[in-house]
């Protein structure tokens, strides 16, 4: 009998399991071994602080973000007074799972099958990897952190079977030596309909490796060919490919994260990947912490209504950011003309400063009203087509 069974051992599930174990609850963390999620691997300073990430996991420290338009124009945004950390998910996720184990969570390796209920209570049914046999783990509460196509969400939470998502694909390659086109402390973000008709492509350094990939909602796009085209564009065709990964990435938080009984969702299963940027690691871990907080409240009181706390806590802090990013994606990712205008807007120094202050600290910056006004006017002029997309 566990107080909680956490289904899914990515950053969200591992964080929830660790928080619950540290609070003294008996926790099981169920995870499929061997799966690595495609991910650029960027983590902001706030994540490093809030979740106590050790230096050895940070494989690169990014000082510049380069935005590249459909016509090849590049805008370099320098990160003042800090850096964006880069991690390799293969090592980062395993560290988080093992840290949860070290503070008391029991690791179970296998595949989630279903949830059953009887007079004795709630049971998570799963197939053990080593034996291939079905196992049953009883739990007072279940946290579903098993990804964008979450089996827990589909079976237990209204709307969990219809979450919108993009398909992300990347290739981890052996990084080349620094040259005119590749900088080991610069992330390149490529806004080009030839690479992705509705999202973006990326080249993110990972120390002696790099992540090269793209995402799209368009099911007709050949992800591997688009990534090959991106590698050719970036001069990375001849670099050794270490591994390839693809997965759905949700782009909208679900309207409900609990089943009103004994299940609460977290991370991709709850849809908490940031629109526009596709950033997921910080929000996954924040969502895992919110789910653990709600689960503790439920375990103390026995009131199923406490499970709603996870969504309330998360959206109270991050909901406005998600709305702003969704509006930006809807406005600028529709065509190459709009993407050209978006990169042009990024020339503005106030846009750069406000964007990265918000990114680094995960809060909208409200201390510069004149800058906000100027940016708002430029934004309107670009969207109305009053100015040339090359104007900055």
Image (cartoon, rainbow, N blue to C red):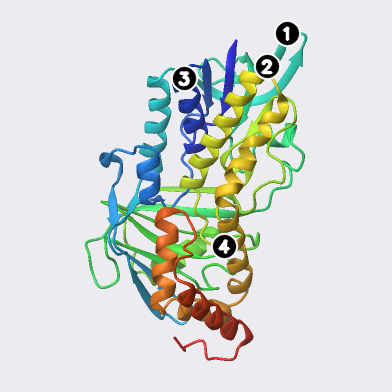
In front: label 2 or label 3:
3
**Residue 250 against residue 382 in the figure, above or below:** above
Mark 3 lies on a secondary structure that is loop
Q: Earlier in the sequence, mark 1 or mark 3?
A: 3
In the image, residue 118 above or below residue 303: above
Residue at left offset 28%, top offset 54%: 61
Q: Look at mark 3 in the image and give the residue it sits on.
A: 105
Circle nearer the N terminus (4, 2)? 2
Q: Is residue 312 above or below residue 26?
A: below
Q: Residue 242: in sight, yes or no?
A: no
The secondary element bearing badge 2 is classed as strand
Mark earlier in primary sequence (1, 4) = 1
Q: Quadrant of the C terminus?
A: bottom left
Which residue position is annotated with label 1? 120
The reply to whether dot 2 and dot 1 touch (C-beta < 8 Å) is: yes
Residue placed under numbered mark 2 in the picture: 123
């Amino acid at each position: 009998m566990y107080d909680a069974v956490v289904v899914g051992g990515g950053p969200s599930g591992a964080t929830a399991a660790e928080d619950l174990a540290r609070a003294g609850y008996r926790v099981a963390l169920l995870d499929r071994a061997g799966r690595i999620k495609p991910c650029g691997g960027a983590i902001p300073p706030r994540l490093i602080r809030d979740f106590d990430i050790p230096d050895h996991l940070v494989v690169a420290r990014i000082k510049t973000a380069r935005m590249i338009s459909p016509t090849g124009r590049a805008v370099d945004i320098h990160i003042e007074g800090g850096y964006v950390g880069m991690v390799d998910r293969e090592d980062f996720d395993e560290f988080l799972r093992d840290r949860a184990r070290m503070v008391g969570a029991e690791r179970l390796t296998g595949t989630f099958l279903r949830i059953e209920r009887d007079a004795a209570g709630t049971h998570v049914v799963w197939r053990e990897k080593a034996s291939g046999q079905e196992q049953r783990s009883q739990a007072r509460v279940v946290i579903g952190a098993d990804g964008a196509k979450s089996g827990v969400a589909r079976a237990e939470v209204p709307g969990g079977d219809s979450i919108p998502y993009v398909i992300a694909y990347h290739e981890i390659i052996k990084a080349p030596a620094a040259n005119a086109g590749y900088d080991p402390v610069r992330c390149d973000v490529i806004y080009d309909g030839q690479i992705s008709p509705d999202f973006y492509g990326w080249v993110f350094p990972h120390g002696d490796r790099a992540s090269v990939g793209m995402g799209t909602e368009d099911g007709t796009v050949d992800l591997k060919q688009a990534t090959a085209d991106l590698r050719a564009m970036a001069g990375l065709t001849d670099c050794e490919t270490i591994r390839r990964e693809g997965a759905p990435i949700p782009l909208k938080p679900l309207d409900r994260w609990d089943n009103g009984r004994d299940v609460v969702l977290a991370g991709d299963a709850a849809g908490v990947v940031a629109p526009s940027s596709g950033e997921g690691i910080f929000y996954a871990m924040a969502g895992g912490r919110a789910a653990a907080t709600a689960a503790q409240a439920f375990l103390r009181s026995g009131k199923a209504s406490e499970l709603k706390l996870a969504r309330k806590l998360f959206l109270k802090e991050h909901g406005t950011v998600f709305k702003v990013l969704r509006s930006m994606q809807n406005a600028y990712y529709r065509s190459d003309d709009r993407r050209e205008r978006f990169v042009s807007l990024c020339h503005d120094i106030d846009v750069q400063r406000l964007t990265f202050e918000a990114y680094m600290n995960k809060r909208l910056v409200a201390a510069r009203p004149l800058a906000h006004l100027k940016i708002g006017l430029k934004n309107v002029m670009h969207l109305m087509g009053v100015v040339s997309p090359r104007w900055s």
